[in-house]
Image: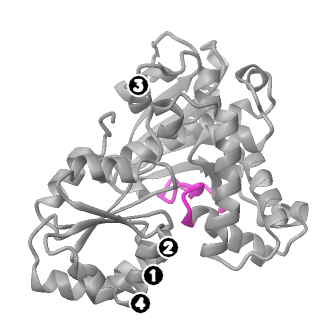
């Protein structure tokens, strides 16, 4: 097992909270991490029909099996169990006894907020960051290979073919997870919806056009986007909300957490196909944004400090990392050449922050190999994203 960046945050939390909850998409490494980090804990998975039936039918006796706590995997399969766990924790509030993992964000967090508020620390384990990917003995050497392969641990750990792995992953996701999260009757249309969303990654989220293209209503499109968010497939990035005296577009941007999944959904089957694909730039933008989301999450920091900028005059920048007094503007360009035109958009947006209460810095992440400094903008190769 490679070292995950979230490990130290989990260790600190386990010293203070009786329950640690780890959510994230299927196959992000929750079970491997929890069993490796808490190796002396008993382990039980509610994916097993027998264990799940026991937890549902007699939750008190189920929990009584574990006087010293346990790792309970896929706990959202028996959400009522958490109400009984509350009593167990109140009787024995020693820290770090119970480790809960789950792959459905909304269902699990709703149950936790009702039963374990104040008793648990909650973490999201997302797919691998780029530094985590490079800890494997074999990892992608080119940008196209990195985007195509994605960042799910199993692909690297077992040396699997990404095309075959994502085919099975999507089939399992649509057939099992979607059915559990919501009552989607037409799974074929839902899979078409996911594919359309993949084509909209790093774009403004327009529910009207998305619903029209898929042949569904806008309320259904909004509900299905929530399903993708609940299962950690995609997320919405909001437009910057600070005061810069500009009329900003109100629509969020849609991003996928994993570039390899986007490639598979778009029918891209080799890194060479990706290299000439018209959406390569969008896929790279989502990769960069997702890397920042994963980094913030692993540090235990809120992702509410992340946004983008797009005003009604066409000025835009892909990502803003902001604090009450500082904004960092980040532009993502998949080109291998750091030409002056790469900086036009970011400099235009930077001028909008002149005279505001924000101190402003700027960075462009590109597909080349050389770091450069162009006056007020740092140009960073994609491999060195985490060094700045």
Placement of 239 over or under 363, stated as above or below: below
Q: Is residue 286 visible?
A: yes
For marks 4 and 3 on the same chain, the one whose residue lies earlier in the sequence: 4
Q: Which residue is mark 4?
A: 57
Q: Nearer the viewer, residue 294 or 248?
A: 294
Marks 4 and 1, how far apart in space? 6 Å
For marks 3 and 2 on the same chain, the one whose residue lies earlier in the sequence: 2
- Residue drawn where x is 57% and y is 37% of the image: 287
Give the crowd class for mark 1: few <14, some 14-19, many >=20 residues within 10 Å: some
- Which quadrant, please, contains the C terminus? top left
- Residue at disc 1, secondary structure: helix
Magenta-drawn segment: 230-251
Q: Are marks 1 and 2 in contact (CB under 8 Å)?
A: yes
Q: Is residue 225 visible?
A: no
Marks 3 and 1, how far apart in space? 38 Å
Marks 3 and 2, how far apart in space? 34 Å
Measuring from the top left, give residue 238's x and y in whole percent.
56, 58
Measuring from the top left, give residue 126's x and y in whole percent.
45, 49
Quarter of the image for residue 95 reads bottom left
Q: Nearer the viewer, residue 353 or 141?
A: 141
Q: Which residue is mark 3?
A: 136
- Residue at disc 4, secondary structure: helix
């Amino acid at each position: 097992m490679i070292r995950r960046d979230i490990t130290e945050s989990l260790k600190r939390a386990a010293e203070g909270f009786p329950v640690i909850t780890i959510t994230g998409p299927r196959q992000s490494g929750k079970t491997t991490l929890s069993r490796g980090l808490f190796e002396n804990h008993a382990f039980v998975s509610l994916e097993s029909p027998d264990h799940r039936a026991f937890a549902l039918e007699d939750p008190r006796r189920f929990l009584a099996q574990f006087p010293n706590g346990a790792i309970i995997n896929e706990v959202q399969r028996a959400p009522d169990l958490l109400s009984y766990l509350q009593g167990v924790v109140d009787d024995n509030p020693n820290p770090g006894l119970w480790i809960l993992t789950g792959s459905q964000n909304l269902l699990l967090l709703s149950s936790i907020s009702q039963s374990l508020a104040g008793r648990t620390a909650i973490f999201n384990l997302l797919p691998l960051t780029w530094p985590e990917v490079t800890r494997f003995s074999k990892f992608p050497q080119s940008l196209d290979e990195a985007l195509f392969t994605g960042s799910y641990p199993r692909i690297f750990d077992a040396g699997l073919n990404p095309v075959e792995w994502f085919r099975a992953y999507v089939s399992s996701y649509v057939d099992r997870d979607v059915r559990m999260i919501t009552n989607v009757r037409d799974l074929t249309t839902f899979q078409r919806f996911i594919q359309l969303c993949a084509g909209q990654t790093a774009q403004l989220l327009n529910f009207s056009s998305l619903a029209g293209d898929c042949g569904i209503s806008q309320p259904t499109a909004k509900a299905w986007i929530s399903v993708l968010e609940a299962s950690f497939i995609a997320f919405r990035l909001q437009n910057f909300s600070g005061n810069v005296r500009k009329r900003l577009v109100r629509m969020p941007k849609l991003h996928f957490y994993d570039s390899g999944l986007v490639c598979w959904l778009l029918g891209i089957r080799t890194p060479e196909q990706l290299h000439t694909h018209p959406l390569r730039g969008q896929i790279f933008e989502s990769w960069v944004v997702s890397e920042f989301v994963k980094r913030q999450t692993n540090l235990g920091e809120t992702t509410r400090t992340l946004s983008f900028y797009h005003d009604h005059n066409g000025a835009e920048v892909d990502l803003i990392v902001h604090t009450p007094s500082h904004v960092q503007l980040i532009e993502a360009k998949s080109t291998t050449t750091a030409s002056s035109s790469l900086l036009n958009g970011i400099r235009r947006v930077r001028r909008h922050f002149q005279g505001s209460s924000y101190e402003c810095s700027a960075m462009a992440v590109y597909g080349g190999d050389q770091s450069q400094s162009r006056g007020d903008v740092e140009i960073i190769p994609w491999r060195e994203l985490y060094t700045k």
